[in-house]
Amino acid sequence: MCRYLPLEKSMKRVVTDSDLRYLDRRGNLLRSRAEYSIANILSFLGHNYEYNARVITDGLNFVDLDFKIGDRFVEVIDSEADLEKFKLVKRKLPALEVLSIGQSSHAAKQDELESFFTFSSSSSQVGSIFIEDPSLAFDYAHILPLVEKCSILHGHTSTVMVEIIGTMKDNLVMDFGEAKRTIKDALSTLDHKFFISQQYLKGEDDEHFQIAFEGPKGYFNLQLPKTTTFLLPGEATVENISSQIIKLLAPKMPANVEALGVYVYEGVSKGAHIIAKTKPGKL
């Protein structure tokens, strides 16, 4: 997952869903990041689902709804066509239990759209919010001694998206403003740091770590300032960095939050997504 970049931010490139491929754990090719997130949440919570489930509306006419869970459905409203499909189902099959998740531009046009979805018949409702913003980014350097291409010092600018999953409280999972502030605070801990596995630590003094290892590119012997070094309990992969962000965020989450998902993009069109429970003893 290496891409050689300067530590300073370079020219930004806009990445859309059309640039990426989203495959769920069942091998389904999903159409958008929202669908991919929902598939991950459903799998994480242990719910079996069918993707692109066909529903007969009348006679020989049918529509395909995004997710079928038991006898219920979830539809992601990503376009005007999705919105019209949802309206058709509600009109033709009013008894069918369909919950929808939509972008605000579409949700404003349809009263029935909900910003959450439920998975059980209990009164508690599980919801998910997504925080994505260009300001949620950090610069870092790392070395992966076990990967030849990545076994020399190099850097990345990574953007981050966080999903926060929990029981609805006063019709909210968490205030967006509070969530964004919490995420930015966590990322400031990682920004402009050098990541390296603590297994390569050979010694330290009050101000420095001594790091040494033999890699594919030769023997490295580094003296690193503690203030700009972040030791990891494993290799400095983007997956491990995603896990570290969850560990930084989890203690700052409200009590109703049950899980966090963190996407860290390493360059363009590649990265890692880690989802983990946030309750005590689960991380």
Image (spheres, rainbow, N blue to C red):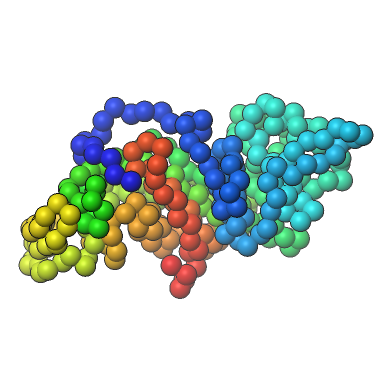
Q: Residue at x 36, y 28 (%)?
A: 13
Q: Quadrant of residue 249?
A: bottom left
For residue 146, above or below residue 178: below
Residue, far right:
59
Q: Residue at x 25, y 58 (%)?
A: 146
Say which of 143 and 15 sits in front. 143
For residue 176, above or below residue 18: below
Count the labels in the image: 0
Q: Is residue 128 visible?
A: no
Say which of 74 and 5 sits in front. 5
| Residue 61 percent location from the top left of the image | 86, 32
Q: Is residue 203 left or right of residue 79?
A: left
Q: Is residue 164 left or right of residue 237?
A: right
| Residue 124 percent location from the top left of the image | 68, 60
| Residue 170 percent location from the top left of the image | 62, 53
Residue, far bottom:
281
Say which of 169 and 108 sits in front. 108
**Where is the C terminus found, in terms of image quarters?**
bottom left
Q: Residue at x 83, y 46 (%)?
A: 96
Q: Is residue 183 visible?
A: yes
Q: Residue at x 76, y 60 (%)?
A: 121
| Residue 138 percent location from the top left of the image | 30, 43
Q: Quadrant of residue 234?
A: bottom left
For residue 74, above or below residue 229: above
